[in-house]
Image (cartoon, coloured by chain):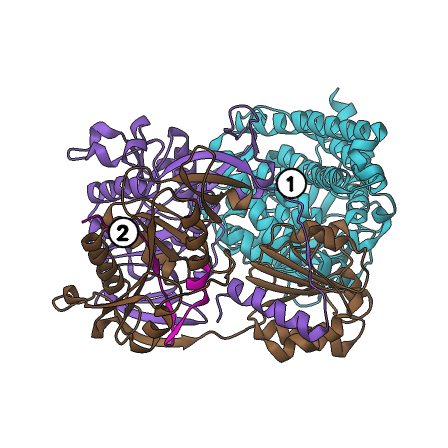
Chain colours: A purple, B brown, C cyan
């Protein structure tokens, strides 16, 4: 079939080290020393889906990322799993972007590197965790898009079935390519990349684009000035929990617990 | 004519009933309204193929107006139809704020509408308030909840916010009069064909989940004491689509044989949305395995049990009785 | 560390992932039930770990001795037993096949080994004389196109789990000066009258079957000789450095594993006054520093050996020294790790005592350290 697939990846601070993050007490900025960066965990599942489709149908997979120069390291790691090439969109002017400005830049990069039949993203990033980007990339590109996807299949005619998680149930939709999907981690299990992949990653093309490489970038939509949301101060959240004690008969407690539990589970 | 600014609350429905998240957002809207300088109206917005019944409930929910956007195509959730209708309507009526619960549907609807309106959306707010500088800020978690950030939407309108269900508490609000009810047909959908076709819906099966992947974990410790109580915990876990975990003590007393789902520093670490520990004392090695969980509820007969220092909810009671009572209710 | 770069860091991460996700879950069962999960060899083959020192024509991923060292270290951190078995297939017995093997042998044995589909064990030890080749009782006599083997070996690693066994037998009177007289035969497991005997219970490495093998009039085609007749020991000539260095890396990996466990334990275990063991006791901190230092000294020596291999330099003495030193470090670090765990260090369920038991194996296994000392002394 030879599909053209794009996977958007993000370099994030290692979630396993989040508990070591701290704030500078004076400037209130984040101290990130000693924290490694990794590929956003959900994006690995996106890469895995792409590689599975490549093995099944034949595809060319491109990784796309917006980030600092150092994010090239994460893209190389991503290439080790099987994708064919990678594009890093990096420029000071892209800095400070919120999800909408990020989605705009990703959309432009996808247009430039594309066109793609399928664009796969991890549903949310470990650091910002807005889960906005898959929908917003789709909307900006005018492509059908859907998030929280736990199942995906394709037939020989390019017709897809996507399984989306809803409240207490799943909904399965049919859609034609091209398509944008945000995948949940339980869609698949990420393979361990083999040595061949790791050692071959350095030979795969990795292109870095800055603002100059784009012909028709609307500068009012990029970076900090293109972000309708602005971040203010950070506060530390306290870890020690204050327990609310529930008292009464077992039946009363159970009833209160039920009201506490249901919303967490997304149930009525 | 001077129109008051509006706070729109998207009223999500599930099988013809208003989701509790609506009332949670409503409570916060009223709270915020009091600290705002100008007079605001609170408006409920609902999308439906037939909103007759639910709109009645919304009218008496202490809002100033209810907009019912109707169209045949709005029966089942479809991301393209819903986002198109809500954004068109917002463009037409220009609310100041638009809040959507970050449920399975809302979590997709909100960013889609924000992109269509080219406006800012504060995601998964844990609070919305006026800060010391008089700015409208949204408190949003980052880095797995380790830190909170203030998010502002200074220039674009509407100011959008999404809030996960259960974050805000519902509150009782005196409702003096019924709201104005406005029906509008979502004409934009007449000429629109979605590129998604709903083919099938499937119920969620509860399975023997591995504990480290589950969103819900119920764990038992020494205090479980016997097979019957343990069975009750497992039954409850099944009902909540959750995984079953346990401490070493439980293995010691013979209720589990292997360490597949043992939680602790020498076992597994879990990060579920909901963790409930029954009969667990809370030795540090177990706590280290659960400390990043969303909500921690602990039940133990010992008032001084260590686990209560790391819990959100403390229940000093016999596990067996609480489990029995929960099985009646959930 | 000086040899690390971005690519090697990726490689290390991937092997560490394999070790954590696929090897670790089996370690307990392996120790208790004494079964070896042969599928781990297959997986190591699939992931290309076994191919890190073989060229692509043979199914490898390209030769890089440091890369192989990094991979072996990561696996040994979790289990030196699994490390040993992966190492045997990656470099122990198969490497000589690459240099002196025939095309047929490479097709039949080497390539499947690199893919993880087969294992080749080398068996040298005998009841009388152990490493003393001159005293071997296992002999072979030519009969037409076949050699007839009689005798037996003890302490054969992976006895009963291999496709092929490399048996060293005397085919002439052994000449200690020229080292000629012994021949390496590649014996297939299904050879009639080839028997695997008693499997021993050992101090550690329960997942690896160590046992006796017996040959009674076993006929081996003359195409199944590794290298030349009477020059069996020479078959290992070009792989001496690797043999010692990759045994050493197992010990280093084991030491690092024990050290990291101890560090984690002492930094997490809350002790008096709400502070950790690490915070409360200088003795604990100093011990950990000593362990760290020993490990890094060993690392410097051993990875220097890998770099020498990479540059094609002769470093036989250094590799032998590394094997001795690494075992020493492993034993020292594992022993201290047990103590740092206090009572928990003695409990089987906690896993740290396994490191201690495993650390002694290399003092004798592979090549006994005192024999190696003798060999180095001849080169000084």
C118 up-or-down from C99: above or below? below
Q: Which mark is residue B95?
A: 2
Chain letter for mark 2: B
Q: Position of residue C20 (x, y in %)?
A: 61, 50
Q: Is residue C139 visible?
A: no
Q: Choose between B16 and A161: the one closer to the eye.
A: B16
Q: Choose between C248 and C113: the one closer to the eye.
A: C248
Q: Is residue A198 visible?
A: yes
| Label 2 crowd bin: few (<14), some (14–19), many (20+), radius 10 Å | many
Q: For the residues marked 1 and 2, what is the alpha-carbon distance in whole angstroms?
A: 90 Å
Question: Label 1 belongs to which residue?
Answer: C231
Label 2, secondary structure: give it.
loop
C161 up-or-down from B17: above or below? above
Q: Position of residue B262 (x, y in %)?
A: 70, 61
Image-based side of B289 in relation to A233, left or right: right
Q: Where is residue B224 in the image (x, y as percent from the top left)?
A: 77, 70
| Quarter of the image where one finds residue C281 | top right
- Foreground label between 1 and 2: 2
Q: Where is residue C303 in the image (x, y as percent from the top left)?
A: 62, 28
B113 up-or-down from A234: above or below? below
Mark 1 vs mark 2: tell me if same chain. Answer: no
Q: Residue B6 carries which label?
A: none
| Residue stretch rendered in magenta on the structure | B1-24
């Amino acid at each position: 079939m030879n599909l053209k697939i794009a996977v958007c990846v993000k370099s994030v601070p290692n979630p396993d080290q989040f508990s070591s993050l701290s704030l500078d007490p004076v400037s209130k900025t984040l101290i990130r020393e000693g924290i490694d960066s990794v590929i956003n965990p959900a994006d690995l599942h996106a890469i895995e889906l792409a590689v599975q489709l490549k093995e099944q149908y034949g595809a060319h997979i491109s990784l796309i990322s917006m980030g600092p120069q150092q994010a090239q390291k994460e893209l190389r790691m991503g290439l080790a799993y099987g994708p064919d090439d990678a594009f890093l969109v990096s420029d000071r002017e892209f800095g400070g972007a919120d999800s909408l400005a990020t989605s705009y830049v990703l959309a432009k990069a996808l247009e430039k590197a594309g066109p793609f039949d399928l664009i796969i993203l991890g549903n949310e990033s470990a650091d910002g965790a807005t889960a906005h980007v898959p929908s917003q990339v789709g909307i900006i590109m005018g492509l059908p898009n859907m998030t929280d996807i736990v199942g995906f299949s394709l037939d020989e005619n390019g017709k897809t079935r996507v399984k989306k998680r809803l409240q207490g149930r799943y909904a399965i939709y049919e859609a034609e390519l091209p398509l944008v999907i945000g995948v949940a981690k339980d869609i698949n299990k990420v393979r361990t990349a083999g040595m061949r992949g790791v050692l071959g990653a350095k030979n795969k093309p990795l292109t870095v684009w800055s603002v100059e490489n784009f012909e028709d970038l609307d500068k009012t939509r990029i970076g900090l000035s293109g972000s309708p949301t602005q971040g203010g101060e950070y506060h530390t959240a306290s870890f020690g929990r204050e327990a609310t004690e529930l008292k009464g008969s077992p039946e009363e407690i159970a009833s209160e617990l039920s009201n506490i539990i249901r919303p967490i589970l997304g149930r009525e | 004519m001077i129109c008051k600014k509006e706070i729109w609350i998207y009223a999500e429905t599930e099988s013809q009933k208003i989701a509790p998240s609506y009332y949670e957002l409503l409570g916060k809207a009223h709270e915020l309204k009091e600290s705002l300088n100008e007079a605001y109206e609170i408006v409920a917005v609902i999308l439906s193929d037939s909103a007759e019944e639910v709109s009645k409930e919304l009218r008496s929910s202490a809002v100033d107006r209810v907009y019912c956007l109707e169209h045949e195509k709005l029966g089942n959730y479809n991301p393209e139809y819903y986002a198109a209708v809500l954004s068109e309507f917002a463009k037409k009526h220009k609310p100041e704020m638009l809040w959507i619960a970050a449920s399975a549907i809302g979590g997709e609807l909100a960013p889609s509408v924000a992109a269509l309106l080219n406006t800012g959306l504060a995601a998964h707010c844990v609070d919305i308030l006026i800060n010391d500088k008089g700015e409208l800020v949204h408190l949003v978690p980052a880095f797995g909840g380790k830190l909170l950030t203030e998010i502002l939407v200074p220039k674009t309108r509407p100011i959008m916010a999404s809030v996960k269900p259960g974050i805000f508490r519902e509150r009782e609000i005196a409702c003096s009069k019924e709201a104005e009810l406005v029906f509008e047909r979502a004409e934009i959908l007449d000429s629109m064909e979605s590129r998604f076709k709903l083919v099938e819906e499937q119920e969620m099966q509860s399975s023997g989940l591995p504990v480290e992947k589950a969103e819900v974990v119920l764990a038992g410790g020494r205090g479980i004491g016997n097979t019957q109580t343990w069975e009750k915990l497992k039954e409850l876990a099944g009902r909540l689509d959750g995984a079953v975990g346990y401490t070493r003590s439980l293995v010691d007393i013979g209720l589990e044989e292997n360490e597949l789902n043992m939680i602790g520093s020498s076992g597994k670490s879990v990060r579920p949305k909901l963790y409930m520990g029954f009969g667990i004392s809370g030795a540090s090695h177990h706590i280290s395995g659960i400390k990043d969980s969303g909500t921690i509820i602990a039940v133990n007969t010992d008032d001084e049990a260590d686990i209560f220092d790391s819990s959100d909810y403390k229940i000093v009671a016999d596990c067996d009785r609480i489990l029995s009572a929960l099985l009646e209710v959930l | 560390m000086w040899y690390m770069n971005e690519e090697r860091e990726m490689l290390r991460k991937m092997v560490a992932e394999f070790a954590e996700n696929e090897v670790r879950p089996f370690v307990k069962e392996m120790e208790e039930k004494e079964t070896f999960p042969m599928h781990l060899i297959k997986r190591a083959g699939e992931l290309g770990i076994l191919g890190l020192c073989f060229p692509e024509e043979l199914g490898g991923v390209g030769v890089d001795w440091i890369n192989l060292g990094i991979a072996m270290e990561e696996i040994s951190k979790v289990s030196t037993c699994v490390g040993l078995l992966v190492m045997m297939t990656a470099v122990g017995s198969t490497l000589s096949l690459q240099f002196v093997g025939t095309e047929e042998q490479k097709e039949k044995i080497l390539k499947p080994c690199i893919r993880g589909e087969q294992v080749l064990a080398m068996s040298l030890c005998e009841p009388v004389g152990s490493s003393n080749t001159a005293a071997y009782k296992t002999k072979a006599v030519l009969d037409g196109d076949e050699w007839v083997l009689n005798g037996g070996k003890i302490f054969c690693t992976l006895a009963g789990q291999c496709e092929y066994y490399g048996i060293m037998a005397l085919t002439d009177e052994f000449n200690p000066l020229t080292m000629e007289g012994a021949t390496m035969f590649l014996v297939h497991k299904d050879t009639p009258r080839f028997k695997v005997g008693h499997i021993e219970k050992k101090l550690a490495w329960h997942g690896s079957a160590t046992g006796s093998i017996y040959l009674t009039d076993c006929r081996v085609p003359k195409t199944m000789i590794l290298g030349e007749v009477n020059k069996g020991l020479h078959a290992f000539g070009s792989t001496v450095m690797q043999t010692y260095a990759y045994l050493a890396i197992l010990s280093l990996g084991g030491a690092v594993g024990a050290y990291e466990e101890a560090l984690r334990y002492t930094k997490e275990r809350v002790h008096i006054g709400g502070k950790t063991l690490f915070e409360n006791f200088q003795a604990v901190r100093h011990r950990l520093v000593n362990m760290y230092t020993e490990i890094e000294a060993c690392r410097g020596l051993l990875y220097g050996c890998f770099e020498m291999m990479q540059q094609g330099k002769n470093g036989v003495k250094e590799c032998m020294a590394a094997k001795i030193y690494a075992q020493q470090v492993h034993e020292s670090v594992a022993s201290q790790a047990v103590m740092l765990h206090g009572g928990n260090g003695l409990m089987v369920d906690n896993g740290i005592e396994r490191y201690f038991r495993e650390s002694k194996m290399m003092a004798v296994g592979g090549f006994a350290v005192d024999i190696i000392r003798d060999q180095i002394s001849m080169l000084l």
